[in-house]
Image (spheres, grey):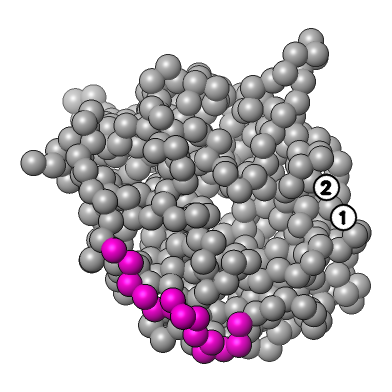
Amino acid sequence: MRAGTGLLALAMVAGLGVAAPGAIAAEKGAVAAAPASWIDAKTGHRVLRLSDEPGVSALYFNEEAYTPQGDRMVISSERGIISVDLKTWQQRLLVPGKELQLLFAGRKTRSVYYAVRGKAAASGPAGKDGDTRPMQIWTADIDSGKTRKIAEVSGASIASINADETLLAGVTAERSMPLQPGTPARDSRFGQANYAATGPDGKPLTFAEAKEVRLNDRLEAKIPMEIFVIDVRTGERRTVVQSTDWLNHLLFSPTDPSLLMFCHEGPWHKVDRIWTVRTDGSQLTKVHTRTMNMEIAGHEFWAPDGKTIWYDLQTPRGEVFWLASYDLASGKRRWYALDRNEWSVHYNISPDQKLFAGDGGDNEMVAHAPDGKWLYLFRPRDIPDVAGIHAPDAESLIKPGRFDGVRLVDLSKHDYRLEPNARFTPDGKWLVFRSNMEGRLGVYAVEVAGPAK
């Protein structure tokens, strides 16, 4: 899958029906009503329902959703891409269109990036989750709404843009392989396939266990893949990594334009998941090496300053829980312990790097937590040397610590097939998350300070 094969050629993609630059729909720019607000009865924290309109969604927990100035957030719905004022929470339709895929906001300019897909190809190369549809990449100015097409790819997915917005990163596979046979690549209710499988005894597996089976099927298929970058200015495309491992979750450093993080996807106890690489293909680095059987690490994310990678670590899986970090410059590591009920599908970090958040999990997930369906705020606490007495090699060892957790939102009615994907707002005062706790898809925010009066 070299550059000359044409699998990712920036060729014209016909019939995508994109609105012309600057096009205005009748409702474009209209301001939505103020969000509903209440106090969570079990936590005392203030919760806002930002939107529950049809098809509403917020970005994945580690994808950039805010303007560089921190004043606006982007979400999407069936109407198109929506801009949210983070002071008033008022919303306006930025780019109308029912088939738009919100990708990410820019880290340098006040831009939002999105994709428009064409018709699926019957065969040939595919992008994320086996999608064979061609893709046009567009950008919209967050203030004026003016749009511009910047790239076209086929048989591929675009996953990230670098810190100075000069390179797009994407992934392609030689052929499509849907994760759940016989169903669409994604279930619109949950943002992932509706996994189902049977165990060795012929009985149906839980959703979480069935997902493991399907992930393993895809991993074992050993489909040739590649990570590539596209120069936004010239359209040049370069291959970065080639592999028959399952390559996924591309995420550029928030500060270093040439550094890309990615994962080897599959059952976490089976793969070496977290990697970094330079955009010229050099300095391929494994971030974590397991030291015991059934140790798992994943759901990695960058610290805001780009100096540290954080990730979920379990030693072993489902028994001992940590949020771990890796310092890129020094190689030093820090692990914070959590209780079983505090384990979360995803974690996140505040802009000032003093607080963390977790979105909890249900009793079918890896922690099998009996009371884990909460949105959490965590304060890190380091574990010091006793009496100030240091081991001779203390500086070379993992720095241990513990999270002290506070419950922010009761998610007892939430179906965790939809991942909440909590993220701090740029001022650190709110956590934005997705939920179906009211019986329908919605985007919410909870106030970090509290309990509310």
List x then y, in percent, for residue 411: 37, 32
List x then y, in percent, for residue 288: 58, 41
For image coordinates 23% across by 28% down, the residue present is: 42
List x then y, in percent, for residue 379: 26, 39
Q: Is residue 323 visible?
A: no
On the image, which quarter does residue 307 sit in? bottom left
Alpha carbons under labels 2 and 1: distance apart: 7 Å
Q: Is residue 402 visible?
A: yes
Element under disc 1: loop
Please say if the residues under marks 2 and 1 sit with CB atoms less than 8 Å apart: yes
Element under disc 2: loop
Residue 240 marker: none
**Outermost residue toward the left in this view:** 453
Note whether 373 is above or below 227 in the view shown: above
Note whether 366 is above or below 444 in the view shown: above
For image coordinates 91% across by 59% down, the residue present is: 123
Q: Considering depth in this image, is 33 or 220 the residue closer to the camera?
A: 33
List x then y, in percent, for residue 133: 78, 64
How many marks do you count on the picture? 2
For image coordinates 86% across by 63% down, the residue present is: 121
What's the magenta bit mostly, secondary-structure-wise? loop
Mark 2: which amino acid? Met
Quadrant of image for the C terminus? top left
On the image, which quarter does residue 335 sit in? top left
Mark 1: which amino acid? Arg
- Horizontally, residue 1 falls left or right of residue 358, namely right
Residue 177 marker: 2
The residue that mark 1 highlights is: 175
Quadrant of image for the N terminus? bottom right
Note whether 299 is above or below 393 in the view shown: below
Region rendered in magenta: 19-33
